[in-house]
Amino acid sequence: MGTRGVFTQDLTKDLVEKKVDLVIHSWKDLDLEGHSGTTIVGVLDRADQRDVLLWKKSSLSKNSPSELKIQTSSPRREYNLKKFLNNSLPSRYKNSSLIFLPVRGNIQTRIRKWRNSDSDGLVLAKAALDRLLSEDFLNSNELEYQEIRKFLKKILEESIFQVFPLSLSPSAPAQGAIAAEVRTDDEWALGFVRALSKPEVVSAVEEERNTLKRFGGGCHQKIGVSVLYKSYGKILYQKGLTDSGEILEIEKQFSDTFFPPAESVAKAYPVPGEAVKQKRIPLDSSQGFVLSRDGKEDKVILPEELILKDWLVTRGNAFPNLDPSLRHQGIVWTSGLKTWYQLAERNIWVHGSLDALGEEELPKHSIFGMSLDFVKCTHVGSTEIGSGLARILTYRTQPMEDHPDLSEKTHFFG
C-alpha cells in the first residue's frame, strides 16, 4: 500500500459528518498530511516502540537449514532485519538464507496464517501484543477479550521471541502511540483530549513523522525512525533506504546538560586502543555461584536454582558455564549488541538487549504475561557500581599490563 491513512478514512468521514464526536487511532496509521476540518491530538503514554520476532519452537531443532522463512509485509522491517538477523539468530542458522514473505490482516489473523504455514518466524509490533494481552482496561473481562488473551498465550507457549533493539531496527514513525481525532471546531472535545496529551510523546512522534514525510511518506518506505526521550537527553535512530537510494545510518544522542570539551585528545581516557587489557578468568562453579546483592551478605546459588532465573548477561564470557544436562528455563537479555552477537555465535538464543542504554531498560516484572526474575551475570568487582539486581559472579578480571597515570586526564568515558 503506497500511502498511510487507508485504514482510517471511513472513520474520519464519520467524524466530519458528525456521526461520531471522537475517533481513536493508532497514530502510525494516520495520513501524514492530515484532513481538512479535523485535528489530531496525541494522547496517553506511548507503548513499547520496538518490533518483536515470534519464532516457532518447532524450528529451533533445525540445524543449518537452507532457508528460513519470516513473515512480514513491512519493507522497513525486511530491509533492516536482513542485516541484523544474520547476527542475532543462533549460529546454527548462520548459513541459512532469509526469505521474507508477505502477511496481512489483524494481529490474530496474521498469527493464525503464520501458525498454519511452514514459515519459521513472524514479525509484529510489540505494542500490539502487549495491548491485546493486557487486562488493565474497562471491559477486559468480556468474553471476546478473554478469548484473544487465551489464544495469544497458547501461541506464546508454542513460540520463542526476540525483541529487536531500536538502534538497529528503528520502528515505523509513531509506532506504539495513540492519537485522537476531533473536529477542529469542537472546542469542548479538543479541550478534553488535550488534557490527556503527553508533550514528550507528541514531540517524538511529530519528529518521526516529519522525517518520513521529508522522504516522501507511505508504507512502502524502507525507513525506520525512532526518537526516545530519556532522563539524560534525546536519542535519535534512523535506518533504512530512501526511494532515491540514500542509505540512512543515523544514531545520535542529544543532552540538555553542557559538558565542556576536553582541551585535547591527550586529556581524555580511554581513547581507542588505550584501555588496560584484561584477562578474564572463569570462576569455579562446581560448588555453585556466588550471588551478591547490594547491602546484603553474599550467598551461594546452586546451578539447579540459577537455571530458573532470567539472566542479564553483561559480556559474552559472563554467560554461566553450566553442565550441559541443565537447561536454562528463563530468558536471556544482554547489556549491549556486542554481547548479543557473541552469545549468538555460541548458538545461544537471546531474547533482547538493553541496547547499551542502562539497566532501566530491562523489562519490569513481566513480559508477554510471563513473570520475570532477573539476575545480572557479571564479574568479581562489579559490586563497586550500584545495581538494583542480584549479581551472579561468573568470572574475575586480571590486568595484563600496568594501569596508566591518569592524574593529567580530565575526561573519562565508560
Image: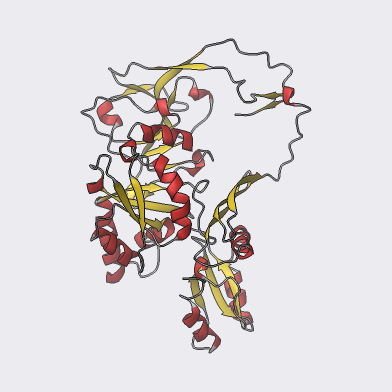
**Circle count:** 0
Locate residue 87, reporting x and y percent. 42, 40
| Residue 142 in view, yes or no | no
Identified at 44% across, 45% down, the residue is: 84
Q: Which colour style is shown?
A: secondary structure
Identity of the residue furthest to the left in this view: 325
| Residue 252 in view, yes or no | yes
Q: Is residue 337 left or right of residue 132?
A: right
Locate residue 265, reporting x and y percent. 73, 26
Of the pair 66 and 217, the residue shown nearer to us: 66
Q: Is residue 320 left or right of residue 235?
A: left
Quarter of the view holding residue 88: top left
Identity of the residue furthest to the top in this view: 402
Q: Is residue 260 left or right of residue 170?
A: right
Identified at 52% across, 11% down, the residue is: 400
Identified at 48% across, 41% down, the residue is: 354
Quarter of the view holding residue 241: bottom right
Identified at 53% across, 67% down, the residue is: 218
Locate residue 346, reporting x and y percent. 34, 31
Locate residue 124, reporting x and y percent. 39, 58
> Does 282 sit above or below residue 131?
above
Of the pair 288 and 156, the residue shown nearer to us: 156
The quadrant of the rendering that contains the C terminus is top right
> Does 193 sit above or below residue 226?
below
